[in-house]
Image (cartoon, rainbow, N blue to C red):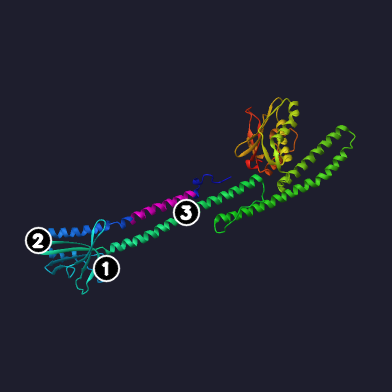
Amino acid sequence: MIAIRDFTRSSSFRVGALLTTLAFIAIALVVYFWRLANSDVFISQSQTTVHTNVKALSLLYKELGIEGVIAAINSDDFSTDISDSPATMPLSTFIALSKGDKVVAGNIATIPTITERFKTASVDLVEVRLRPLDSTQTLILPQALMQEVALGDHHLYVGQNIEDVYAAQRFSKALSWIVIVLLSVLSAVSFAVAVYVVNRINRMSETADKIIKTGSLQTRLEIDSNWDDLSSLAIVFNHMLETIENSVNSIKSVTDSIAHDLRTPLSRLRNTLEKIDDKELREETTQEADNLLNMFNSLLRISGLETTNKKEGFRNTDITALVNDVVELYQPLAEERGITLSSALQPLMMNADPNLLFQAVANVLDNAIKYSPDNSAVVVALTATKQRIVIAVNDAGMGVGEHELANLERRFYRADGSRSTKGNGLGLSLVSAIVKLHEGTLWYVHDPLLRGKGLGVVFSFAQSSRA
């Protein structure tokens, strides 16, 4: 049994998928802003700023003349300092108003000289040489925007250093790569954790299901790590199995010892009862002794099947012939009571212990005939699907209540409707032990022949058992 058959429906997978999705969304946003930062959007904005300043001063010249322009340039609105060191220069706007070769207003002492021109996708950039006010050092701005216009006999130079924009782009690119790598690792780890958790849960579930089906308490969960909570849970689960196994073995040991120790004195008692002169009393007492001996023998047989798990008797077996032999064995008993015993058998071979499987089918068929009314029907079927081999014994007898189905395999359990008939309640316990030895499952069907009552007992074996 797999606990999480649909992987996508597990909570672990959903959490991992959610984290992965969020990480991919974050990566998409980072890539978007990265591309935005690496585009010429910010440079275009700087160009717009330069163009706006030039346009504003040109309009001011038309309105107030050159004096108004000089006053505006010398105002705080255009007072921008340039660092003495190009390496540490902040983003800044430089402006100069010159007449002839002399700067008459602005924040630089010399007329900016263009030493190189180059283009980007959307703007024209220049390399500019200039000297700030109050400085004797000439600066070179390797990447700048500049616009020159004539205002009468004066020339206006407005420019902006965009070296910081490129520096910010380089930094954002490096940071983006770091974030993308971290988010990718987070996505991979989240998904890996989800897969790991689901796989571990399914392995634990399969082991538990195997223990339930086979009844083998020696099986333990595999522990291949010790750092996670699931491994700690597996260790606790194994300790619990060990405790249960010891308890069950102790109980079985006591039961088996009692059955073994009492079988010998019961055999002696029966031999003594054979000497009773009264025939009726002799038959009655020996029959009761036989019933007790059969009970103890059945208990020891069930215990042997459940604890030893021996498969020495397994071989390639013609299941069709085996089931047909059981049907033929019980045909006279069915005819004696007017019960129609029919069979539908598909030719099949299987790796099995023929003696044990014969006994299991015989026990079930014996019950079907025993608890069926006269002139009713019992149907035995042997079929196969792609995954399973199925043996079914269906009757139209008294059946059992649905609330009793879970208890049918308990030792000494007898359904309410069968308490008046002979039996010790060990038949289906023995059948269950035989089926588990063959790594099969035993289940029941209510009213299998659609007669309003009855019980169907079904043996199901994996196709891997097929020879």
Q: Which mark is residue 89?
A: 1
Rendered position, 467 above or below 69: above
Residue on which disc 2 sits: 64
Residue 283 position by quadrant: top right
85 with respect to 420 (left or right) = left
Three-letter residue code for mark 3? Ser
Q: Main secondary structure of the magenta part?
A: helix
In front of the other: 116 or 250: 116
Q: Image check: 464 left or right of 48? A: right
The quadrant of the picture occupied by the C terminus is top right
Mark closer to the chain start, 3 or 1: 1
Q: Is residue 122 visible?
A: yes
How many neighbours does mark 3 have within 10 angstroms: few (below 14), some (14-19), or many (20 or more)?
many
Q: Residues within 10 Å of mark 2 (few under 14, many from 20)?
A: few
Q: In the drawing, what numbered circle is on residue 190? A: 3
Q: What x and y, as percent, mark residue 397?
A: 68, 29
Image quadrant where one finds the N terminus: top right
For the magenta stretch, what is the residue range?
13-34
In front here: 159 or 91? 159
Q: How far from the left and from the top, in percent, is residue 342?
A: 69, 28
Measure the C-alpha gap from mark 1 to mark 2.
34 Å
